[in-house]
Image: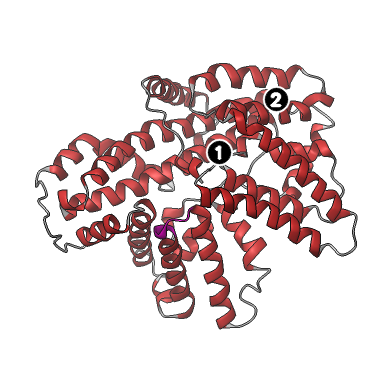
Amino acid sequence: MSFVQINFLFIFLPVYILALRVVSVKFQKPLLVLGGLLFYTFGQKYLVIGLTASVAINFGFQKWILNVKRKTAPLVVSVIFNAGILLACKILGFLPLGISFYTFQMISLLVDTKNEKISFIDFCTMSMYFPKLVMGPLVRYKDYKDDLKRADERRLVTAEGIEEGARLFTAGMFIKVVIADNLATLWNSINVAGAAGITASVAWLGAITYTIELYMDFFGYSLMAVALGKMFGINLPENFNEPYSSRSVGEFWRRWHITLGAWFRDYIYIPLGGSKKGAFRNILNLLIVWLITGFWHGFGLNFIIWGLMLFLFIVLEKFTPLGKLTKIKGLGNVYLIFVIVISWVVFAINDMNSLTDYLKCLFGIRIEGASPAGSQFMRYIRTYWYLLAGGIFAMTPLPRMFAKKFGKKWWMVLILAPMFAISVYFIIQGKGGAFMYYIF
């Protein structure tokens, strides 16, 4: 199931909110678990058995880790078990919905509760909470404990939470369905044409389009996940903090997919020694983190190159004068956008010959046999200018500032209601495509 399906919007979600509101407090957690199972069942119904089996096995690992003095061995076994399943799925090309996010969430849960008793129902609730089940955000157990405790004491669903969640959900759905999914049409047209059939200007338009599309798609999902958390009373952290306003690659990755970056920092980078064991070890630790980040996204060579590219720029920012240049307002922003746009091209194109040709086209290097059409650029601009402009505007700090100042005003409904209606129209028309990060 997806957040942008009619059945979810008008059947599953309202029925589920009503059920959470009317059931006895003691049944709230079981209902949260059931919601995850149903959501996953409607998405990939045959894999729900694997999901429940994984939760049961990992709860066994948690008890084993908790009840022994020397915790390293069982922790290593549990990590190998979960990472091994993820690795096997990647190698075989069999990717259950959200397997990477689920695996990382399970590993962090086992590490975080190695010294703490946790009930089976809390373990299941943490594991199967469906707003974060397939695409995050990744949540730390310590940040979840208060909400889990509150669920035992009073009703989670409140009118205030539903209202605030509905506002956020509408904004996220509009960003995903109206902006991201329509820009996907432009990027697909340019990508399918290939570098031999486009000019350098169209190649740059395609790269910028994909840069906007990917952000709008994932940002839209994350807003909807946070919104559902507010509706259900189990809160989720924000996953983006205006990343395209950054001045360096390092800063960008602290503000893009925040919870995933924090996961790599807390469970890989810091345990390896972080930056506290000298420059060589720091560089080595960064290399390991970015290689794993590349592999996490896929086994394609382009993902490895993408990870190594980002690693290289982060190292240059830390250990060369480039770091000082990134601190200059304006110059740092331009540098960041240039590097990130190129990096997303590497991320998006998994065929090495096609990727090489596209990069050549970006920089005006003639490709043998190329016969690009000269009128494409203006035709695309005339067709998609308002979506490109809307996407660029949505990536600036202005929408957040507007929402913070006016988000709770009564007249916001006059803006949000048409946004909701337009989004539903596009979904009915078949524009509500799968989220891009579902494949990870």
Q: Secondary structure at mark 1?
A: loop
Residue 419 belongs to the span the image colors magenta: no
Q: Using residue 149 as the reference point, say whether residue 379 is left or right of it.
A: left
Q: What residue is drawn where x is 42% and y is 20%?
A: 421
**Viewer-proximal residue among 159 and 311:** 311
Looking at the rendered structure, the number of numbered marks drawn on it comes to 2
The image quarter containing residue 145 is top right
Is 15 located above or below residue 223 in the figure? above
Is 193 located above or below residue 233 in the figure? below
Q: Position of residue 299 (x, y in %)?
A: 47, 56
**Viewer-proximal residue among 96 and 266:** 96
**Viewer-proximal residue among 415 and 100:** 100
Q: Amino acid at mark 2?
A: Thr
Q: Using residue 36 as the reference point, say whether residue 280 is left or right of it.
A: left
Identify residue for label 1.
97
Among all residues in the image, which is located at the extreme front? 92
- Marks 1 and 2 sit apart, C-alpha to C-alpha, by 30 Å
Q: Amino acid at mark 1?
A: Leu
Identify residue for label 2.
158
Residue 214 visible: yes
**Viewer-proximal residue among 376 and 351:** 351
Which sits earlier in the primary sequence, circle 1 or circle 2? 1
Contact check, label 1 and label 2, Cβ < 8 Å:
no
Image quarter (top left, top right, bottom left or bottom right) of the N terminus: top right
Bin the neighbour count of mark 1 within 10 Å (Cα to Cα): few under 14, some 14-19, many 20 and up. many
